[in-house]
Amino acid sequence: MDQEKAHTLLARQLTDILANAERIIHGNDSAEEIESFARYSLELKRYVNERIESEEFKTAANAIPDIDYKRSQIQIWQYVVLPAWWISIYKDYQARKKTKAEVNLVRGKYASLQLLAKSQFN
């Protein structure tokens, strides 16, 4: 793949991941959306490492922290013990809240990466 095409695809992917981050930050913070964002972030970094030749850009992309979110699963026994499932839901809420803050940080880094891409590749 030639570098011009790789840069065009990268610009689109950066726009997409920033839009996904905005959705999470501004309300759609479901477990599925957060897990999808985390996978997309890892795939984007892999794409940069495989297709982009600029070492400065690779270094900046790899400096972006990974989102580590695992949703809580409510076990059958927790339904039997009434307050136990509420605890799981609360723990998942707290984990999503923490992850939302991480996504906000990562969004800023992707925005910086997008500016770097525009300055280097245009």
Image (spheres, rainbow, N blue to C red):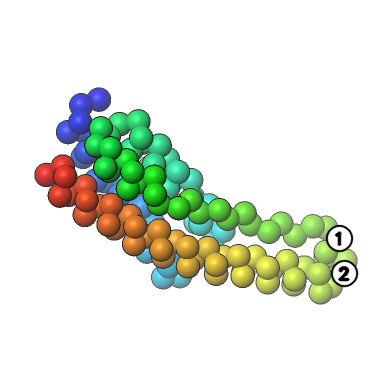
Is label 1 in a helix, a strand or a loop?
helix
Q: Does the image show residue 79?
A: yes
- For disc 2, the marked residue is 81
User: What amino acid type is highlighted by mark number 1?
Assistant: Trp
User: What amino acid type is highlighted by mark number 2?
Assistant: Val
Mark 2 touches mark 1? (CB < 8 Å): yes
- Residue 49 x %, y %: 36, 35
Q: Residue at x 16, y 42 (%)?
A: 121
Q: Does the image show residue 28?
A: no
- Position of the C terminus, as image quadrant, is top left
Residue 79 is left or right of residue 38, and the answer is: right
Q: Which residue is drawn at 81% across and 74% down?
A: 83
Q: Is residue 35 above or below residue 97?
A: above
- For disc 1, the marked residue is 77
Is label 2 in a helix, a strand or a loop?
loop
Q: Residue furthest bottom?
A: 83
Q: Which residue is drawn at 81% across and 69% down?
A: 84
- Residue 52 x %, y %: 27, 34
Local crowd size for mark 1, using a 10 Å CA cut-off: few (<14), some (14–19), many (≥20) = few
Residue 33 is left or right of residue 54, and the answer is: right
Q: Is residue 72 above or below residue 101?
A: above
